[in-house]
Every structure is written in C-alpha cells, then in structure tokens.
Image (cartoon, rainbow, N blue to C red):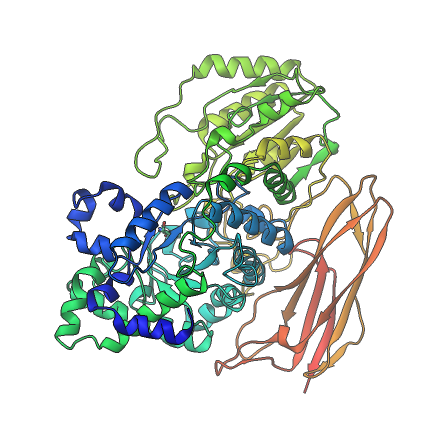
Amino acid sequence: MNDSELRSLLSDLSLEEKIGQLTQLPGYFQDAGTITGPAGDMGLTQDDLRLAGSYLSIIGAEKLKKMQTEFMAQHPHHIPLLFMADIINGYRTVFPIPLAQACTFNPELIEESAATAAREAAASGIHVTFSPMADLVRDARWGRVMESAGEDPFLSGQVAAAMVRGYQGSDLNEHGRIASCLKHFAGYGAPEGGRDYNTVELSERTLREDYLPAYQAAVDAGCALVMTSFNTLNRIPSAANEWLLREVLRREMGFDGMIISDWNALQELLAHGIAQDQPEAAFLALRAGVDMDMVSPVYARNLRELVEQGKVPMQWIDESVWRVLTLKNRLGLFEHPFRDADEAAEKTLLLAEENRRMARRCAEQSFVLLRNEENLLPLSGGEAVFIGPYADNALLNGAWSIFADDLDTVSLKAALQRRPQTRNVSVIRGCTLSDPEHPVIGFQHPLPPEDLDAEAALAEAVQAAKAAEKVVLCLGEHRECSGEAASRGDLSLPRCQLRLLDAVAAVNPRIIVVLFTGRPLDIRPLSEKAGSILLCWLPGTEGGEAVLNTLLGENNPGGKLSMSFPYCTGQAPVHYNHLNTGRPWKLGILDGRFGSKYQDIPNDPLYPFGYGLSYTTFACSPVTLSSSCMTRSSSIHASVSVTNTGRRAGTETLQLYIRDLSGSVARPVRELKGFRRIFLAPGESRTVTFTITEEMLRFYTLSMDYASECGDFDVFIGSDSRTDNGARFTLTE
Ligand code: NOJ
C-alpha cells in the first residue's frame, strides 16, 4: 500500500478497530476459541480477540496461515495480524546464548546467526522477533544476563546492531527476514541486587553514557520496534515514562518505529503504584508513547471510554495505530499476509545441515578457554574419561529456546560416539545437575527431581577417574537457572557438583572442566582444582559437537569474556570499566586499611572482561602511536604487531582501551573502543592498527554536553581488559 492508501484505511477504521490494532494477545487465547480462563479473567470480550492487532508466541506455517485467513475474513477491514515471538538465539536450530555469542567478538558471525534464525522463523510464519536484548548488565546474579551481550557498552552495541541487521536485512520485505524488536527500554539490566523486575536507579549521566549506547546502536541499525522495560527507572516505570519514550527514544535517539510494552506491563502500572486504576494506566502509557499493549486488558478495556470522555485525544490513538499499520505495511502483509510461512520450506529449512553448521561455528567461536595448565588440552584422542551431569545431557539450549526440541540437540556423549577415536570412552554421570534441596523452577513449576543413587554414582566416578589418564568433568548450572525471573543470590555451583569435583580431584589431578552456564559463576573451586577450564556457556543444538571439536583441538578456542567472572557472589556487580575512586587500591601500592577494597576478597574479578586463552600463544609488541598529539580534527593511529608464538594456528582478539586521565567528571579507568580478530598461523606476525578519533574520546561532561575535553589519554592494546600495554597521547584544540 502506498501512504495515502494506508492513511485512508486508518481514517476508515472504527474506534474499536483502532484500539484492536493497539492490542497484542497471546496465541493461546485464540486456541481457546471462547472467552474463558485467562482471557476471561482479563475481562476481554470476543470482540477484543476478533479485532486484535497482533498475537504472540504461536508458530507453524499451517497454523498461522489458517489463523491469518480466518482472522482477516472476519475483520471488518480485513487487516492482517502481526505474529511475534521470542526468537532469541535461534528458532529450531539453536545458537549459543547471546552472552556467549558476544564472546566471539565477531559481529559478522552474529549477524549470520540472526539471519539464519530469521529464515527459519519466517518459514514458520513469524513476522517479528523480540530480540535483541541490548540491556547492559554488570551483575551476574540477574538471570537475564544470558540474553545480554554483557558488561561493555561498545561490545553490546556491536552485538545488538549485528542482530538487527541479521534479522531484518536491508529491507523488511525481503524474503526470509523478520522485524526486530529491541528491548527492554531502558535500564532493565541494572535491577537492585540483581533481582529480576526490581527497581533501577541510574543517574542520567550513567544512563546516557553506559546504558543507552547499545540501544542506540540497534536503533541506528534500523530496528523496527522497541519494547519498554518492566522496571522503574528513577521511580518511573518505563511504560509510563513520557520523557524516556518521547524525548529520549524518539526525539534524541531518532526512533520512529513502533513501541510495544512488555508482557502485562500496563496492568503492572497499578502495582508500581503510579496508576490508581486501569483507565489511568491506559492514559499514562498512551501519553508516554506506548503504541501496543502486550497481553494486558488495559488498552482494550479502557481506551474507548477515555476517548469518549475527551481524556485521550483521538490524535494519540491515530498516531499509534499509524505506526502499527506502517509496520504491517513495511512487512508487506497487506499484499502477502502469509509472508514466508511455508510448510514445505519448514521441512527443508528448519535444522538444515547448513544451519547446524552455522550453529556449530558460532558455538566454537564462543567458547572461552579460562585455564590450560600444562597444556592439558587439547586431548590427543580417547585418553580421558568424561564425568559429570553435562557429559550426557542434551539440555544445552538457553532458557529462551522455547520453540526448539531437545531431541534435536547433540549431547557431548552423542558427539563422542560419532567418532572412532572417542567412541569407547567412558561417560559417567557422577552426580545430578542440581542439588535435591534446591529444586529448579522452570517457567511454571519446579522441575521433577533427578533420579540418581548419589553415593553409587559418586563411587563409580571416582573409580573411573582413578584409572584414567585425564578426567573431563562436565559441570554447570541448569539452563533454567538463568533467563527471565531466574535471578540467584548465590553464584556457586551446586553442592553435589562441588562434591564430585573434590572426590575426583582427590584421585586424579589432571582435570579438565567443561563448564556449561547461562551466567558468570563463582568458580574458585574449579580454578583451584582443575588444570583446564573450557567455558562453553549454553552452546545450543550443535553444542556436543562443538565442544568435542574443541576438546580434540580441531577447533582452537579464541572466545573472550563478554562479562567478568566475579571472584565470588559478594563481589557482584563487578565490571572492568569502573571509576578509579579517590583511594584506588592495588596490592602493595597503597597498603593498610583505608584503600577502596574488601577485607576478605580481592577487588579484581577472577577472570576479567575480554579474557580468554588459546591452544597457542600470542605475543604483542608495545603500542606505537603515529603521533603523541592529536587535535579535534585529526586522528592518531595506534599499532601493535602480534605474533603467534605457539605451534598451532589460532585467533587472537586484540582490544583497544582508552583512558581519559582527567576530565570535568570522573572517568572510567578504561573503556573498550575497538577490537580486531586476527587469525595467525604458527610463527606468523601481523601489524594491527586502530584509528583513534576525537569521537571516541567523548563523554557526558559536567554540563552534560557529549564532548571531548583536552588533556592526556592512555591507550592500551592487548588481549584482555587488564593489559598494561599502553602509550600516552594528548588531545589539544
Ligand atoms: C517478557 C519478557 O520480558 C520479554 O523479553 C519477552 O519478549 C516477552 N515476555 C514476550 O515473551
């Protein structure tokens, strides 16, 4: 449709039809057919279901085509539905969780992964995904950290933008693309105490400097929708925050797409205590600029009366309906209401070999080698015994892989059995994945207890460990321990797994831990007892294959941490780009009581942001600068030469950090400003050059201008955020 056709459609709609366009309901309301259960409890009528603008979380080409056909036939203006779903790290082929994808430091690969997910989802009839989540996270207790790109604003922005490009391509109407909904605007990743949905208090400077850039990167990449966050931001829930949505998001950040609330968030304005009743909630949200109400009765039940009473101007309604219709039009739904939904394509495309290959590549690049004493890894073949609850377990998809089937996932045991050299290795469970006294709560219910004779399992593991040359211990957190509403107050591994570790370590010190998790954990016991630790996150459908390729050295791990691993839970939140304080404390430098430190633990995380080893080694030359001075209109080149000094080919990711030594407000001790992945053969050297521009030196100054200030800067280039390989330059007018 052209714009004037769309305008005339809008002006033709009745008020009920318009309000319908602003309402999104869950697929199971339609399945029910009649108004009972939750739809009834919400006070919705058959008309609300008949006129809704969108349904979420239903999949399948056949089903969605039928639903679309029936819906359009009965709709007074035959307006097609938008189908949305959470395609977070893959649809049927599951990729590593986003936090792991960020460890690849490879935006191109992330883009391709998102494009693969989009093709699969589009074939099943999906039009919009609720991804990327660009919420910056510094606290590993927050369960949704798995869905983020970690603690760094720059890396988070690169990841979010890559995902948007991958889902949407250059035109939403392209075959195999879906629209991307950026979430959760804003600050959802900073809840007090790491508890999901909790209060967020951020100064405007911190919000703008650290939290907004990743969202901005996704907006700049053209995301079609934005979802508001559940939390209050400085006491105002995002779904009612006019300043945040209209002033910051739309006017300053330049977002002109559709804004949707998060699930039931408009109803929750009552619990937040800023709306007395539903009509007030509807008024506040529409005034703030929320176009579509996700799964609450607030718009559907109240907007009509508010318009009739003259409390809500028709113009607000029309603006929001216009955005919904525009999105439908951009997706080509008026001409092709089924879009790419195609039963035949579903059969050939979902879990296609090339999609699995892509998932494998992505998983392999996301693995982070945290330790490798005495080169315990790689294995030379079948010399190790595999022990632990993840050794034979297909629960390798992240918590959001709601449309995938675990039966499609390759476990480590399955991968071992596929290869002649590992076919006969012993695989022993050793203990349960979770402690019986801490039942894991799934989305709805506690999961059934695992069935195992704990003593016999431990004895069997010890016996096998004693006899083996090396032990591969496959440990970690249950996937349901991270994700939405899965915050934790203790980041330790389950007690039963620590007991297994102790028992095995007592008989065989040659331990390689393969760690599966959705978040950084307190892994001090692993660092003490295991010679090698390979962090594999929740690697997805091809997890087992990717892990085995890596253990055997067919893949040389090169991932770098997208988030620090805290020393212990009490250290969270911890992040590398902190301020210096007036009393910075470094062992041996400022000793005594009055430094900024803990009495019982170090300040530094156990493994810092950007950290990751390889089966080979790299040497990096000192930083050379093209000049030690730059002006606002010039730039400086900072270079290092990096050499593969080991015996295997491998990838190193060089990271550029900058520190502003003095400003009108306190500046972080360093900030990531660029990175480069380079693949080097043994003995090979390459010069890597970063261009430093004035733009990279900007921040929110005392007067809240986004500007640079003249003075000295340190530039560091190295293999992680702790590098002290640096040089100094001065910015002058
Ligand atoms: C709630 C979550 O916060 C959001 O991220 C998700 O996209 C929606 N539910 C829809 O499932």
Query: Which x, y percent locates residue 15?
Result: 20, 68
Query: Which x, y percent locates residue 684?
Result: 86, 49
Residue 66 shows up from this direction: yes
Which residue lies at the image location 42% right of the left edge and 46% below the top edge? 143
Which residue lies at the image location 54% right of the left edge and 56% below the top edge? 163
Side of 326 relative to 28 (left or right): right
Image quadrant where residue 629 sits:
bottom right
Please identify the residue farthest to the bottom as the structure is shown: 733
Which residue lies at the image location 30% right of the left edge and 37% below the top edge? 444
- Whether 625 is drawn above or below 454: the answer is below
Please identify the residue farthest to the right as the structure is shown: 683
Count of numbered labels shown in the rendering: 0
Image quadrant where residue 22 sits:
bottom left
Side of 263 relative to 505 (left or right): left
Which residue lies at the image location 45% right of the left edge and 44% below the top edge? 124
Front position in the image: 396 or 351: 351
- Whether 502 is drawn above or below 118: the answer is above
Front position in the image: 409 or 215: 409
- Whether 536 is drawn above or below 572: the answer is above
- Whether 74 is drawn above or below 96: the answer is below
Query: Which x, y percent locates residue 471?
Result: 64, 23
Front position in the image: 520 or 604: 520
Query: Which x, y percent locates residue 414?
Result: 58, 24
Q: Quadrant of the N terminus?
A: bottom left
Q: Quadrant of the C terminus?
A: bottom right
Front position in the image: 285 or 532: 285
Residue 241 shows up from this direction: no
